[in-house]
Every structure is written in C-alpha cells, then in structure tokens.
C-alpha cells in the first residue's frame, strides 16, 4: 500500500520546486530598485494610514464553522459510499438517520437566517 | 535495519516535533497557526506510514482544509495583543515545565519498560489494493451505528451552538427575496396608460417613471 | 419493525432526540418572547421520557447496539433523577432567564441535548459511547454558559470552562487510548476481563489509568483539577450554574462507576489511592476556601468541590455499600444544590442578582418561610441531622470505615466540621442580622411551590432515608455484580 | 510503445539498481508537469483568442504567427518584472503564498489517470486525496491576502476563501454520489466502473446528471473564474487577493488558476464522462471505426470541451453578486446534492440501477 504513496511524496517535492523556481528566477532576472512610493500598499490614491488587517463581519466565521461541520459530514459519507453495496439496507438506513439528524440542523440554520447574506 | 520507511518515519516525526515546538514559540500567531498546519501534515504522513490512509487524508481534509482555515480567519482578524498574551508565560512556566516533565518521564517509564518492548505487536503489511476506507465503512455503519448516530447529534449541537453564539440579526439590512421577485406579475410593475396621441412629452415621461419605481422595489 | 423492537431499552433516548428536533424546528415558528409553547413542550418531553423509562424497565442487564449501550437498574434510576433535576431546574430558572432575555429556544434545545448527553453517559458500556456522551454534555454546557453574549464575565467563564474541559477530554481520551492499547478492547466489561486474565503490559495500563483519573478529576472538579469550578460557577448566569451543578453530577457519578468500577475494578488498588488523595485535598481546600467567600455562587462552587471529595470517599471504599452510598450522596447533593441555587434564583430580579451573602441578611423578616427552607437546605449541606445531608455523609463514612480507611474518615469528619461553619453562617445572617432591603420578594407560584417541596424533601428524606438508600444500594448491586 | 517502456525500465534497473525507481518516478512526474505548464501557457492564449472571436475581435496576433508566441512573450515579460514586496507585508508569507497556491493545483495530478495504465500513483483513496488537495488551495489565497497588508487584498482573500469553502461542500457531496456509483475511491476504478460496453450510455453523467452539473459549476466557483470571480472584482476590490503581487509572484497565481481549471476539467471528465473511455465503445459502426483511437485522445478531447466551456462562461455570464453567490452555494447546491445522495443510495437498493 505504501509503495503507491511514494510517488505522491516525490510529486509534492517536485511541486514545491516548480513553485519556488520561478520566484528565484524572477529575483535573479528582474531589477530590484525599491522606493517608498512603489512599496506602499494600494490605497486608491490616498496614503495608507492604518493597518489593513481589520475585523470583519462575523458571518464569515459562521460560514467557516458551518463549513467545518458539513465537511465532517462529508468525511462520514465517504466510507459509507464505497461500501454501500456490502452493508445493504441496514447501512442505508443508518446513514438516513444520520442525515436526517443533520438535516434538522440544516433546516434550523436556514430558518434562522444563518445562510442569509446581506 | 534502516529501511526507507524508517527514515521517512523519523523525518515526519522530527518535523512534527519541530512544528509543535514552533506552534508554541512562534511570536506571530499566524505563523503559529501555519506551523500547526505543518504539524498536521507530518502527522498525516505518520498515519499513512501506519497504512491508515483514510484517516491520514481525512486529517488533511478536515483539519488542514477546514479547521485551520477557521483558525486562520480568527487569528488574522482578531488583533491579538502579543505582549499581553505573553505576560504570564514565565510566571506559569515552572508549572508547565513540571507537567511536561512528568508526562515525558511517565512516557519513558512506559516505553522503556521491558514488557512494552516485548509486547509490541507486529504491524501487518497489507497488499497494494488494501482499502482502509472500505474496512472502516464496513464497521462504522453496522457495528458502530450507535456512536455514529451520536456523532450526528454532536454535529447538530455544534450547529445550534455556533448559530446561537455568533448569529446576530441586523434588522436594518435589506435583503433580496428571490421568491418575491419571481412571483411578481407584469401588472405589479408595469402600468399601461392610454394617452392621447398628441401629448408627446408625457409619453416620454411615463416609462421612465415606471422604471424608477421598479428600481426602488429591488 | 423487528429491528425497532430490539431498540426497546433505548426508546427514551430516541424519543428525546426526536423531540429535541421537533422543538428546535417548532421553536422557529412560534412567535413571542416568553416561549411558553416551547417550554411546555420541553416539560412534556421530560415527562414522556420518564414514562418511557419506567415503562421500558426490565430486570437484569440489557445490552444494545453491539454492546455499546447498557440498560440496568442504575441507569434507569439515574436517568429518572436526571429528568427530574432538569425539569426542576427549568421551573426555577424560567422567570430569571426571561427577565434577562436568555430564555430562548436554543437554550431549551441545548438543555435537552445536554440531558441526552447525560443519558448516553449513564447508559454507556463502551469507552467510545462514554466519551461521546461526555462530549455531547460538555459541548452543550459550554454553549449554554456562553449564551449570555453581552456579559464579559459569562463569556470568560465559558472560555475557561471550554478550554479546561477540552484539556480534560484530551487527558481522558489519552488515558482511554492507553487502556485500549493495553487490553485491545474498548468495551467496558471486556476491558475488565482482559485485565483479570492478565495483561502483558501492566505499565501501560497504569499509565492509562493515571490519565483517566486525571481527566475524571477535571470533569468532577476535584482538587488539584478544580481551578475552573469557582470561576465558572461565579461567572455563568445563575440558571446556567444551576444546570452545571446539578444533573451532570449524576452522569459524572455514572461515568466514574462505568469506567473505574466496571472496567477497571481489577486495578482498584491503584485507583483507590489516587482517589483518596484527590478526596482529601478536595475536602480540605473546598471547605476552607468556602469560608473566605462573600459570593454565594462562589461559596457553592467550593462546597461542590468538597462534596465531590466526599463522593469519592464513597467510591474508593470499593464495596457495594461504598458505591451505593456514593450514589446516594450524588442524588442528595443534586437535590440540595437544586434548592440552594433555586433560592438565589427566587430572590433575583431583573437587573439584580441575589448571589451575595449579604443579600440573605434578615431573610427571616422578609419571608420566614423562605428563610426556613434555606435553613433546611443549609443544614442538609452541612450535614446536620435530621436532614438528608447528614444521612448521606454518614452512609459514605460508614462504608469507608468498613473498608478500613480510618484516617480518611477522621479527616473527612474534621473537614465537614469546618464546612459546617460557612453553611451555618448563612443561617445566622438570615435569622440574626438586619435586612439590607425590605423589598418584597416576588415569586412565581410554580417555583415557590417547588422550593417548598425541595426544602421539605430534604427534611423528609432525612427522616425516612430508607427507600432512597435501598434503591441506590440495590441498583448499584444489580448493575455491577451481575455481569451479563 | 509499452514494450519500449518495459525495455527502458529493465535497462534502467540494471544500470542504476535501487536508485532507478525514484529516478523513473521523477521522469514520469516531469512528463506530467511539463505538459500542464505548457497547457496553462496556451490556455491563456486560447482564452484571449476565443474571447476575442466571441466579441468579434481577433485577439493577440502580433507575436508569432496567429499570436502563437504570445504566451512565451508574456512569460518573459513577467520574469523581467520587479517583484515588489509592499511595506508592512510579512515578507516570508508574502513570497510563500503563491507557491502554496500553485502546489496543490499540481500535486493533485499525481492520482489522475490519463489513459489505461497511464497514472503516476494509483492510490486507493485517490478521490479523497484530490478533495484534500483542492481544499488546500484556499491557503495560498488567505495568506496572500493577509501578508500583503493591503485592504483590497485582504477583503478579496476573505471573500474568495468563504466562496471556495462554500462550494467545496457541494463538490464533496457530488463526489459522494460518484463514490456510490463506483464503490471505490480509486480514480482508475471509477473510470473502469463506467465501462459497460455501451459507450457513453454507461457513463455516470446519466444517473448523476444533476451532480455532473453541480460539480462543474462548483468547480468554476472553486477556481474563482467568471461568473464567480468576485475575488477579483475590479470595480470593487481592485484585483482581490493578488492586488499587491507583481512579476513572478503574480505569474504563479495565474499559473495556479489555470492549472486548477485544467484539473477541474480533467476531474469532471474522469468522474462523469468516463475519463479515457471511448464514447462509442460497443456501438455498431462507430465503435469499430473509433476503436484505434488511443484513450489519451478521448481524455484530452473531453478536457478540451470543459476548458472551452470555462472560457465560454466568461464570455457569456455577468458576474454574480456576493449574496447571490452564497445563496447558490448554500441554498441550492447543498440541498440538491444532499437529496441526490439519498436518491442515488435508495436507487442502488433497487434492481433499477444499471451503472
């Protein structure tokens, strides 16, 4: 089983190399003459006056949290999907119960307006 | 005998220890979070070496792909005051160090115990087509159906809690209601007025007005 | 249908789950701030659960879901008491929460979810289900504490609770994985028999046990893992504190029984020593620190620590009498706490928390009946006869004496004498001090009736402890000594 | 062809011994990566040409015949541009972000089969691996946005991160349907599961048609392509998360986006259109006529169709508004996919399941 993953490991290494190489090349080939105005962050014509990292709408966090929960649900669906033919009706029903419990959560968040974007 | 697997194992193990240390020593919380990602990756590698491919990849999928994204969201957006955060560090350091020492000592005691070394079971090597995922699937939805459904309930609680704790309704916000938009009839928006043919100026004005009121409704 | 009928013993859990889902969705469609419909639905659900638990009771031990779920007398009794505790907690806290805008559908749903978690813990016969039940309970409780989002102190309490709770779960899980590594099974009974047949790796086993005990200690809040208790009890809104401080203790007792007694009985020599240290430290620190408190919620927190120490004395005796008395102690503790916190809730108004000791000054002049009820509750907590608290302490100490833990018993008596001081101080405040305010105390009829029942119950149970005591003894005996 | 490869392999083994294996794998990796890079370069040209023709223009036509050298000229230009690191930026992360964006887009190819037997690593959990890798793409974007210390980059990053994760769910659920049909997570098995001897009638796009559509649209959203390109909504947040990037840093983001487009096209072909399978296999006349066509051709043809659709979308649809985008992801795709998972699972319990 492991022998299958060795090329993947190697591929990741090559991928990193492919990603880093252009940057190194660019650094070598391109000019490097920084000045204040050039390095200032884009700010629609006026001077940047504050740290750009700011707080933002809590909805984004909520999206991220809900994403985690549904991602876990998908993680549970994967092993089920590949063996459904073996585990038959019992497996189908147990997943149906699982999904109905989560559908309650989905209905709840929908009705609460957690999916509303304003 | 140092096989390639052993080398890879020590590589991942060293990487995860290093990443773990950096998680707690990194000055910048974003860096710390990214080192945690690295730690997850190396742990996934170790799991893969144990032939637990489903768990290894799920670790990356769920923890790196989802949980850490949320972490980064939070860490990046909240202006964590680092100096304040580190204030108590040295005060509590002795206690923490003592706890860590106790844990390490216990671990050495257990692992160094001759019994442990003798009872270490052989890891079974599987053929290339062995599917750890199918193995899990056969068990989770049949023998372990009760914990499986409980996991669903846990997720449901998490959904309810997340919404109860973060969602605030803004009453002033304007929303688009698609159902309402679709349900609109021609007569709600457009009014045909028969005008005497001579009044050219007013025919020009009427459609504009209709359009303006139409925009307001959106 | 034949499959459904095999789930007979789990009908109560299934009913509860279905009802929570219904309540969660139904609440979205019921207008109004008072949530009367949702509240009534919740109470009906609790009643339904009780009826189902009684109706589905069968003698003997019944295992379900591939031996992951166990139904025995102990689980049925503890479940019934949990329903009762939750129901009482809701009655007490309703007007308090309404006044603070916290009585939401989510709150009620989360309370029921936490109850489900307790039921799962109580009926677990596998490490996985034990852990999942614990997490279900804890997750709901974290969220409930944090519900008061505008309060900095409640948020801080939730944070502490969450982080230390997560740490405890981690310890517990780590310990369980060690036990799994040593025995090769997660099943409670199988772990026990595996240890009895001799495990090659004893060190690993003890190592796991240490972590399990540490995790349990965290969850129970005994010294030296108690740091979170005072802050959380103090910071959380009183109704939430009441929830944390009552029914979950029953589940925690069941948890201790399932994991230490059912699974790790063969390791008793190891764990009874650990528990003894924890118990002594808890009784000492809890009782002594409680004296210094001016806040009633904080005082109750320290008293909880001390009471949990007492409970452990019962468990570590290692005999049937010991377990039975520990269960009795847990039940009595829950009843007394319900009354104690109920008292604070009754006296609180919108914008005013009656959680300072001085708020109870001269209560006798303002409301003699309430003062009398409080007197009974305080006597019981202190262990003054003829209240039930005395009998609970007596039973625990008796079991410990029989098991030969004489020094421990002496220490326990000593510390409960110290403890009596701060309970009786409240009595003194109520009867001999002048009131700070003469405002009338407004009470809902349901909660005033309940506090009377609660106070008198402490007295009546104290005079006639036999039934409850024998129920506890029999259920522990039937559940533990009849494996399979 | 196959024999030639075998001879090479034996010769190499004899020559280099244990080092041959990794070296041969390395060669294979280069054989995969290089065409992808080339494909990306010419996809940009194709995009400009196709958009040009759709808008009644000719597109690039100055560099080389028919503009064929344009991508190379662009590459050289970007290479010669200064890499600017804005003040207040986190230097290391600023530089690392484009690499993090590109790497997942590349490494996912490790498990993609191009033809029968033409695959680098036929792992059992291939589909899971793909999903895990695509879920990592979001890191490049978030880190780029944060490290830039620019408001526009930051807002763009948050927006696209939320967008990507939302559509990832729909993708995941759609893939569960594919798993149900194939009963395996290996991409090779998934393709072989679509081989029934009826040509394209055996492919999964028929029973899973809604999922096929959802998957591809979610793929478009995942790659931040029009009409879901809110991350780079010029009129609102300048160029989104890569506002501050120049030269090769910018080029890497560009590469990542196009590599992802090609990846999504390849995956859609594998999951729903039978990968390298001949669409006319087993058909009376056409089957025999096309039997000689190599699988690689079919695979590339299918990919080209999807790539064309990507470009066509861009030319046709106006950009979504953010609330519409989130609604489509959460309120249309997720319920739809969830229902379809149950439908497929139930369908499989009946004898009416032919796939």
Image: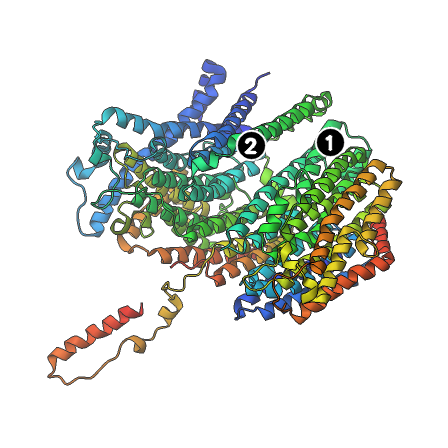
- In which image quadrant can residue A52 be found? top left
Q: Nearer the viewer, residue D56 or D133?
A: D133
Label 1 crowding class (10 Å Cα cut-off): few <14, some 14-19, many 20+?
many
- In which image quadrant can residue A75 be found? top right
Q: Nearer the viewer, residue C443 or A40?
A: C443
On screen, C264 above or below B145? above
Q: What secondary structure is found at the residue carrying circle 2?
A: helix
Q: Residue at position x 53%, y 38% from top?
A: B59
Residue located beneath label 1 in the image: C205
Label 2 crowding class (10 Å Cα cut-off): few <14, some 14-19, many 20+?
few
Which disc, if any, is residue B92?
2
Q: Residue at position x 37%, y 29% from top?
A: D31
Circles 2 and 1 on the same subunit: no
Task: Please give the chain letter of the residue carrying mark 2.
Answer: B
On screen, B7 above or below D341? above
State the residue lying farthest toward the right: C402
Task: Please give the chain letter of the residue carrying mark 1.
Answer: C
């Amino acid at each position: 089983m492991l022998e299958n993953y060795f090329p993947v490991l190697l591929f990741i290494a090559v991928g990193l190399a492919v990603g880093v190489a252009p940057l190194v090349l660019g650094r070598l080939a391109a000019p490097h003459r920084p000045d204040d105005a050039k390095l200032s962050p884009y700010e629609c014509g006026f001077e940047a006056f504050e740290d750009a990292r700011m707080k933002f709408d809590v909805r984004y966090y909520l999206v991220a949290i809900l994403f985690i929960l549904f991602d876990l649900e998908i993680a549970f669906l994967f092993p089920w999907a590949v063996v459904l033919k073996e585990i038959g009706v019992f497996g189908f029903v147990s997943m149906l119960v699982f999904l109905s419990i989560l559908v309650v959560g989905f209905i709840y968040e929908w009705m609460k307006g957690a999916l509303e974007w304003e | 005998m140092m096989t390639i697997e052993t080398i890879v194992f020590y590589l991942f193990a060293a990487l995860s220890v290093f990443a773990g240390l950096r998680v707690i020593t990194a000055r910048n919380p974003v860096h710390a979070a990214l080192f945690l990602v690295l730690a997850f990756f190396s742990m996934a590698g170790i799991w893969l070496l144990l032939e637990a491919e489903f768990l290894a990849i799920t670790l990356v999928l769920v923890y790196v792909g989802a949980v850490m994204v949320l972490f980064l969201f939070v860490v990046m957006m909240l202006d964590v005051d680092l100096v304040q955060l580190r204030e108590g560090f040295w005060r509590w350091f002795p206690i923490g160090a003592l706890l860590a020492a106790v844990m390490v000592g216990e671990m050495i005691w257990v692992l160094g115990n001759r019994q442990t070394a003798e009872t270490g079971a052989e890891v079974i090597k599987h053929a290339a087509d062995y599917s750890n995922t199918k193995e899990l699937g056969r068990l989770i939805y049949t023998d372990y159906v009760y914990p499986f459904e409980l996991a669903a309930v846990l997720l449901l609680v998490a959904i309810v809690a997340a919404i109860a704790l973060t969602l605030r309704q803004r009453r002033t916000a304007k929303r688009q209601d698609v159902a309402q938009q679709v349900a609109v009839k021609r007569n709600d928006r457009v009014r045909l007025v028969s005008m005497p043919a001579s009044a050219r100026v007013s025919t020009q004005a009427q459609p504009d007005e209709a359009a303006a009121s139409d925009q307001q409704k959106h | 249908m034949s499959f459904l009928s095999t789930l007979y013993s789990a009908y109560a859990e299934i009913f509860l789950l279905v009802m929570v889902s219904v309540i969660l969705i139904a609440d979205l469609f019921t207008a109004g701030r008072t949530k009367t419909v949702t509240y009534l639905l919740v109470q009906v659900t609790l009643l339904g659960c009780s009826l189902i638990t009684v109706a589905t009771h069968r003698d003997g031990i019944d295992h379900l879901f591939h031996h992951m779920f166990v139904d025995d007398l102990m689980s049925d009794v503890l479940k019934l008491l949990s329903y009762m505790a939750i129901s009482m907690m809701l009655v007490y806290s309703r007007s308090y929460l309404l006044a603070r805008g916290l009585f939401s559908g989510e709150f009620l749903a989360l309370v029921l979810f936490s109850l489900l978690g307790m039921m799962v813990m109580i009926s677990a016969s596998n490490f996985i289900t034990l852990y999942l039940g614990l997490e279900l309970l804890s997750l709901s409780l974290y969220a409930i504490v944090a519900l008061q989002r505008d309060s900095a102190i409640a948020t801080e309490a939730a944070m502490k609770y969450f982080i230390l709770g997560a740490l405890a779960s981690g310890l517990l899980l780590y310990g369980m994985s060690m036990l799994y590594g040593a025995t090769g099974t997660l099943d409670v009974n199988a772990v026990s028999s595996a240890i009895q047949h001799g495990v090659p790796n004893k060190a690993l086993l003890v190592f796991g046990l240490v972590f399990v005990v540490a995790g349990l200690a965290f969850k129970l809040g005994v010294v030296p893992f108690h740091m979170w208790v005072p802050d959380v009890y103090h910071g959380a809104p009183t109704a939430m504190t009441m929830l944390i401080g009552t029914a979950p203790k029953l589940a925690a007792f069941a948890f201790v029984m399932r994991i230490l007694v059912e699974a790790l009985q063969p390791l008793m020599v190891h764990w009874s020593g650990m528990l003894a240290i924890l118990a002594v430290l808890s009784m000492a620190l809890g009782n002594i620190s409680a004296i210094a408190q001016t806040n009633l919620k904080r005082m109750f927190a320290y008293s909880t620590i001390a009471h949990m120490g007492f409970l452990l004395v019962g468990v570590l005796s290692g005999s049937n009498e010991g377990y039975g008395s520990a269960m009795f102690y847990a039940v009595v503790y829950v009843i007394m706490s319900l009354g104690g916190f109920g008292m604070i809730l009754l006296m609180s108004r919108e914008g005013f928390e009656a959680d300072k000791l001085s708020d109870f000054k001269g209560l006798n002049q303002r409301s003699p009946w309430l003062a009398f009820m409080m007197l009974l509750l305080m006597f019981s907590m202190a262990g003054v006869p003829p209240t039930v608290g005395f009998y609970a302490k007596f039973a625990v100490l008796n079991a410990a004496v029989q098991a030969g833990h004489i020094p421990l018993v002496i220490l326990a008596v000593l510390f409960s004498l110290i403890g009596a001081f701060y309970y009786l101080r409240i009595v003194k405040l109520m009867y001999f001090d002048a009131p700070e305010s003469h405002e009338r105390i407004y009470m809902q009829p349901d909660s005033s009736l309940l506090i009377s029942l609660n106070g008198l119950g402490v007295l009546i149970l104290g005079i006639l402890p036999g039934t409850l005591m024998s129920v506890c003894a029999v259920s522990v005996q039937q559940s533990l000594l009849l494996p399979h | 062809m196959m024999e030639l490869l075998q001879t090479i392999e034996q010769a190499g083994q004899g020559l280099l011994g244990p080092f041959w294996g990794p070296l041969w794998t390395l060669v294979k990796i280069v054989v995969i990566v290089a065409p992808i890079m080339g494909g990306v370069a010419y996809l940009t040209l194709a995009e400009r040409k196709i958009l040009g023709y759709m808008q009644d223009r000719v597109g690039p036509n100055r560099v080389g015949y028919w503009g064929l050298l344009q991508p190379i000229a662009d590459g050289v230009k970007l290479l010669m541009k200064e890499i600017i690191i804005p003040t207040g930026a986190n230097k290391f992360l600023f530089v690392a972000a484009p690499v993090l964006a590109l790497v997942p887009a590349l490494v996912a190819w490790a498990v993609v089969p191009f033809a029968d037997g033409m695959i680098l690593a036929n792992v059992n959990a291939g589909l899971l691996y793909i999903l895990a890798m695509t879920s990592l793409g979001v890191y490049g974007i978030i880190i780029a946005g944060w490290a830039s210390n620019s408001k526009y980059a930051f807002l763009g990053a948050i927006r696209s991160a939320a967008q990507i994760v939302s559509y990832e769910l729909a993708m995941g659920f759609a893939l569960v349907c594919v798993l149900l049909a194939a009963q395996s997570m290996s991409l090779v098995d998934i393709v072989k599961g679509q081989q029934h001897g009826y040509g394209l009638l055996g492919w999964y796009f028929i029973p899973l048609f809604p999922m096929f559509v959802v998957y591809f649209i979610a793929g478009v959203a995942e790659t931040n392509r029009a009409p879901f390109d809110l991350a780079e909504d010029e009129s609102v947040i300048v160029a989104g998360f890569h506002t501050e990037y120049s030269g090769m840093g910018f080029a890497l983001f560009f590469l990542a986006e196009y590599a992802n487009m090609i990846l999504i096209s390849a995956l859609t072909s594998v999951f729903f259109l039978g990968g390298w399978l001949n669409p006319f296999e087993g058909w009376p006349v056409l089957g025999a006529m096309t039997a000689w066509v190599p699988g690689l051709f079919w695979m590339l043809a299918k990919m080209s169709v999807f790539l064309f659709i990507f470009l066509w979308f861009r030319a046709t649809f106006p950009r979504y508004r953010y609330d519409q985008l989130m609604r489509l992801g959460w309120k249309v795709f997720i319920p739809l996919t969830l229902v379809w998972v149950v439908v497929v699972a139930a369908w499989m319990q009946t004898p009416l399941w032919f796939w």
